[in-house]
Image (cartoon, rainbow, N blue to C red):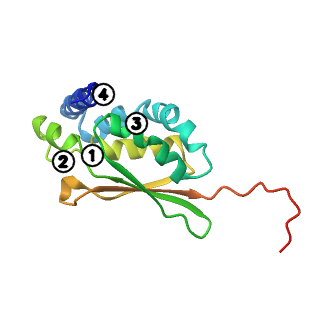
Amino acid sequence: MSNAHAELIEAARKKFSRFRELSEKHGEAKAWEIMLEGFPEIQKQRMGPLLSLPTLAEAFRQAIPQFKSIGMEMDVVDISNRGTDAVLEVQRICPWLEVCKECGYAIPCHVICELDMAATRLAFPEIKGEILCRQALGAPVCIFMYERAAKTSTRTDNATT
């Protein structure tokens, strides 16, 4: 197990534990709010440089080595169409499946993926994201879809139509 993967698993254990403590103390809805505090700013720092690339496909392809370093297998499919810059992020490995059970959760999605998605939407309101399928619910992969209006071309040449 790589050092980055071990750190990821330990961070997940802490996240599940904190969510459980907050849920017991304040209820699940308030725990969610507390866990989300400050997270959009972290997402801006993590994702901002990548999302400044011309397309989401380029951005997500740049992230593949980072995901690989933590033990995940990620494929990126560019589904841009009709003025929409869009991408599918396909995750073949969910490192949180085992650790969530260890921490007493049936699935990791609410505490990990849904929280990440909510933070991303708050950090980047121009990006719409949704989880299309989840390994935790029996799918062979997890698929996340992200979309935004395509960046307009800045061509200044005198091309004719």
Residue 75, position as x, y percentages in the image: 38, 53
Q: Residue 4 has which mark?
A: 4
Q: Disc 1 residue type?
A: His
Do labels 4 and 1 touch, CB within 8 Å?
A: no
Q: Which residue is mark 2?
A: 107
Q: Nearer the viewer, residue 125 or 150?
A: 150
Label 3 and label 2: CA atoms lie apart by: 24 Å
Q: Residues within 10 Å of mark 4 (few under 14, many from 20)?
A: some
Q: Is residue 82 above or below residue 6?
A: below
Residue of label 1: 110
User: Quick one: which residue is furthest to the bottom in this view?
Assistant: 161
- For residue 159, above or below residue 66: below
For label 2, the crowd category at 10 Å Cα-Cα, with few meaning under 14, some 14 to 19 and many 20 or more, is: some
Q: Quick one: label 3 or label 4, which is nearer the N terminus?
A: 4
Going by the numbered disc 3, the residue's amino acid type is Gln
Element marked by disc 2: loop
In this view, 72 is above or below 12: below
